[in-house]
Structure formats: structure tokens, C-alpha cells
Amino acid sequence: MPFQIVHQALHSLRQWAVLLALLACCTACARQAAQPPTATPTGDWKLAWADEFDGPDGSAVDEGRWSYDTGGSGWGNGEWQNYTDRTDNAYVEDGALVIVARREDYGRNRYTSARLVTKSKGDWLYGRIEVRAKLPHGQGLWPAIWMLPTDWEYGGWPRSGEIDVMELVGHEPGRVHGTLHYGAPHTYTGEHYDLPEGETFADDYHTFALEWEPGEIRWYVDGYHYQTQREWFTSSTKGSSHAPFDRRFHLLLNVAVGGAWPGFPDDTTEFPQFMYVDYVRVYQKED
């Protein structure tokens, strides 16, 4: 009898050990996206352009790398912010770019924010775009890391394309979207990536990356490859098989307030809201 009791106890312990091992494995898989980014991407990518935002605290961004889009026209989406070039809305602090969305009257708008662009200072045909950022949250907030054509050779938007590396709508703080816009009529295709339940992109930094090669574009969050696109509508783009994503694009970083997709701020939305960008790195292949 004592032997049977010991045997049953050992059997139960083994079952618990297996269960705990399975739980640990599931937890590790669920948190794969939260692992620190690697110093350099895998493959034969070579660093071609970067901003580590290592200027003095409170300073403006490097004007050799960035310009500002300014104004409060709604930007085609019914947005409520006025983009400015003030350090009230974009500045460097502790080695990071800080984009601030504020509730304040400015011109005819009730909110201010910033939209930074690399046009004519950073323009690329193909490459790996990598941005480590911590995002704002709340109803009506719309942070984005995205790309537009530099030369618009295939015509106005969306014929010449748009590449969204990352977009987040503030009422879904644990989900980001990667999207392509193109074609006539306007077509968009994309997927989203979700953090484990209960986590948000406002809690900590995450690394958003896009690898753009002829005929293929891939999206990553913290090294996890969550989407590949190889086909897009090209009937309005002069017959090129890779059009419109075979021309130079430049990068944009911004936080919009309001708009048709995220909706608009309400009584639950807290201001100011901050988007922190640790670095922007662009890699290309030698060929």
C-alpha cells in the first residue's frame, strides 16, 4: 500500500511537470513579440540611413534628415489636428524623438501634433525600414509610420501607392496594421498584428519593420513576420509588373487626432499623448 501511494504521487508530480512545461512553452510563444530587437537584421542588409535622435534634450530634430508637413486642413481624412513645426509638438529627449499631440486651440483647430517627413533627405527604392517606437493610445488617436512616393510618377494618390509600415487606432491599443494602398479605383490590402491579451503598444517600445523588395513586401513586429504581399492591382501604372512600388518612396512619422478611421476624441481621451521613437534605420542590399 505505501508503494502504491508513492507511485501515484510520483505519477501526479510527472503530470504536473508536463503541464507546467507546456504552460511555460505557451507563455514563451505568446510573448515572442516582446523580445528585444536584434542589433542588425538577418540577411545581407547594409545600413544606408539612420537617425538615433541623440541631440540635446529639448532640441528640434535634425533638419538634415527631416522636414515638417504643417497645417490643419484635415489631410484628406477629416482629421482634427493642426500639424506644426514647433518643439512643443516634436523634440528630442533622452535619445528619442517625442511627437506630442496636444489639446489646444491653434488656428482653426482644437488640437496640435507633428508630422515629420524625410522627402528629398531620405528617399529609397527598396530596403528594410526599421523603427523602434512606443505609441500613444486613446479614442481618436492615430499614430503612423508610413511611406509615400517621392516623385508620383504614376499619378496622384493612390495611383502612385502608399506603404503603411504601422498604423494604430487608439481604441485598439494592442493591435497594429500594415497596409498597401494603390490602383484606380482605390484598393487597399493588408493584415493586422495583435499583442497578447492585456498588453498594449503604449506599455513599452516595440520594433516595427518592413522589408521591401521587387515584387514582395514583408511586415514584422519585434522580429515576428506576420504578413507578406506579392500581388497588387497595377492596371493604371504603365504595365510594370511591380508598379507602383517600384519607384522611390520616403518616410513619414506622425500622430493624427481624429479622422474617418479612428473616430474622434471623447471624454475618455487623455491629452497630451506621446509617441516615442528610439531610432529609425533604413537598410538596403548592395545589389
Image (tube, rainbow, N blue to C red):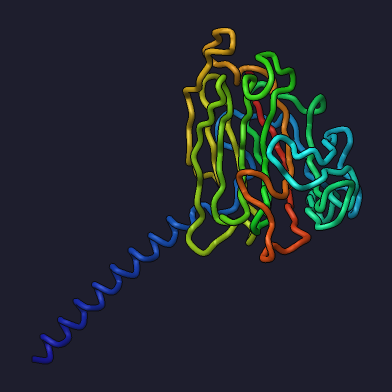
Q: Is residue 105 above or below residue 270?
A: above
Q: Could you tell whether 5 is left or right of 44 in the image?
A: left
Q: Quadrant of residue 103?
A: bottom right
Q: Quadrant of residue 158?
A: top right
Residue furthest left as drawn: 1
Question: Residue 19, percent across and down?
Answer: 30, 69
Which residue is pictured at 21% across the width and 79% down the height?
Answer: 10
Question: Residue 176, percent across and down?
Answer: 56, 47
Question: Residue 105, percent across and down?
Answer: 87, 54
Q: Nearer the viewer, residue 188 or 251?
A: 188
Query: Is residue 56 in sight in this rendering?
Result: no
Which residue is pictured at 45% across the width and 57% down the height?
Answer: 30
Q: Nearer the viewer, residue 265 or 171?
A: 265
Q: Could you tell whether 171 is left or right of 55 in the image?
A: left
Query: Is residue 228 in sight in this rendering?
Result: yes
Q: Could you tell whether 106 is left or right of 49 in the image?
A: right
Residue furthest bottom as drawn: 2
Q: Quadrant of residue 267?
A: bottom right
Residue furthest top as drawn: 238
Question: Residue 162, percent across and down?
Answer: 63, 28
Q: Quadrant of the N terminus?
A: bottom left
Q: Quadrant of the C terminus?
A: top right
Q: Is residue 190 above or below residue 97?
A: above
Which residue is pictured at 74% across the width and 25% down the height?
Answer: 123
Which residue is pictured at 63% across the width and 61% down the height?
Answer: 203
Q: Is residue 100 above or below residue 51?
A: below
Q: How many marks?
A: 0
